[in-house]
Amino acid sequence: MENNKKLIGTLAGLVLSAFTLNAQDINITVKGSRDVEKATRLTESPKIVDTVMPTPVVDYPRMQLNYQTAITVDTIEPAGVKIVDKLPQIYHSYAKIGIGTELMPLGEFYFNNTRSRKYKYGVHLQHLSSFGYMDNYAPSSFDRSKGRIYGGITEKKYDLMGELRYRNEGFQYYGFLNDSIARDSISQRFNDVGFAINFDGHKKDSGNLNYHVGIDYNRFNTLKPSVDSIQDWRTIEDYFAVKSGLWYKWGDDIFAMDFDVKYNGYQFGIPDTNLFVDTGIVNRNTVVSLRPTVTTYAYGNKLKAIVGFDFTIDANTKSKAYIYPLAEVKYSLFNDILIPYASITGGLQQNTFKSLSTINQFILPNVELRNEHKAIDFRAGIKGTISKNVGFNIGGSFAHLKNMALFVSDTLHAYRNQFTVIYDTLNRAQLEGSIYFQAKEKLKVDLMGRYNSYMLINNTYAWNMPTLEFGGRARYNLFNKVVTQLDVMFMSGRKALVYAQEPDTQLENNQYAKNLGLATDINLSIEYLYNNRISAFVQLNNAASQRYMRWYNYPVQPFQFMGGFTFKF
């Protein structure tokens, strides 16, 4: 052991001596420290630096003034959301039946499809008749029946709708004092049947051109004489129309153009021949209209303006062409509280025997037909809302009309007191106003008044047309159980042309004008809703029992009472 220790010590001494000798011969080793910066990655891309250095721009901001502002937030009534497990039930059918004084039955029936996004179809039938008399006057019964069948398809890009319609109406020319005359000798009947088809394209993309095409046909005829040899001596009228339109939206503007062709063929009796005091008449009337317009919106849709014209060809006995202005503008003030508006328009109205008989059913079956030429119609006014429940409309208009149809008693048919049609040129000025009030679904009130002023060339007055008109309607719903509705109507200033001196008659410009007096009509209806499917109703027609003259020597029916029931199933 001792020898081993000596050997290890000798070896260690030799190694240490060797290292010492090498250090003295090569270099001197010293201790020290050096800081090395961390490496970083360049994130910028290489770029060329211009040698021209830009001059820095010094910005001196403007001083700002502080204003004390007040912010007012309008109170918005929260919307009520009704959570239901399922939608209320809709019924396919609705029926209304009733009976009134003077043996007056009433029947009405509706049938339609329920909720559907694609299909729509239904049927509507209605009948009303009266077998009563008016004291001392000729028989005055009537019956009115009409029906309509409709259906259609609604798609994302188009709508296709069609309908068939029928109307049959019988009445008597009762406007004279003779209660013993035979009913059949003064009877008349209108038959009206037609159809319509309409196609509307409504692509939502503003870059597409949308269009509308519609076809309408109607045949209207009067009662066929009972004697075979004179069966041609009645009115037969065929009406056919094609109505089309295009519209294209470009920015805030809508470019549109309507093109309509309307034909009406009217014939009474045999042309160029006479039957007693009647003369055969044939009238072929075509009206072609082209109406290009541009509709624009501005100032956040507060301003709406329509500009265009109406180019119309009247191909009646002589062909004439007219150009009518079409301009309308309205502006919304104070968030639709006030909306002033103005328009300048015109147009040609095609008069048909059907349209004239709708105004006065007691006209002769052979009348002259002229188209009404409205050279200019200027309207201006302001409408708006006073509160969330009250709104109004006040305005006035001035129109220059040529071939305005006026109804006057026919001297050749005085024994039946029928009316013929005469035409005149006139200026008509109107002032009108309306106001409405609505308290949710409980109470609704509408009031309207109009003053008319006429200035004619050939006639003293605008015969049978009122100077002052007033109408009103009020509807009240009590606890969704009792619904009451009141309708009132007043007309005054109407005068009829007569041919001899009578009471309340004055002679002016060699024409006898008879004052028809004040027309007052008040109707009241009350309906009791037993449940969602059954109700009972009561109607009081002409509640004031005023036998005013609607036309010369044609008093209206006096007070009438009607009651009945309605059903949903």
Image: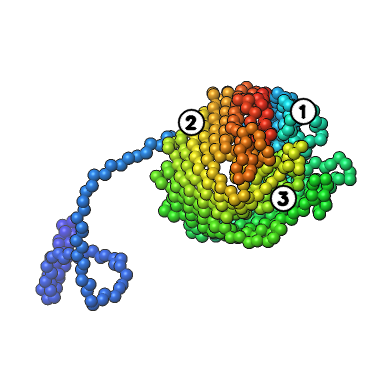
The residue at 52%/40% (across/down) is: 451
- Residue corresponding to mark 3: 368
Q: Which mark is residue 179?
A: 1
Q: Is residue 73 above or below residue 286?
A: above
Q: Which mark is residue 439?
A: 2
Q: Nearer the viewer, mark 3 or mark 2?
A: 3
Percent x, y of residue 78: 43, 34
Residue at the bottom extreme of this rendering: 51
Packing grade of label 1 (10 A; few <14, some 14-19, many >=20) is: some
- The answer to whether residue 90 is seen in the rendering is no
Q: Amino acid at mark 1?
A: Asp
Quadrant including the N terminus: bottom left
- State if disc 2 and disc 1 touch (CB < 8 Å): no
* Secondary structure state at the residue bearing disc 1: loop
Q: Is residue 531 above or below residue 212?
A: above
* CA distance separating discs 1 and 2: 50 Å
Packing grade of label 3 (10 A; few <14, some 14-19, many >=20) is: some
Quadrant including the C terminus: top right
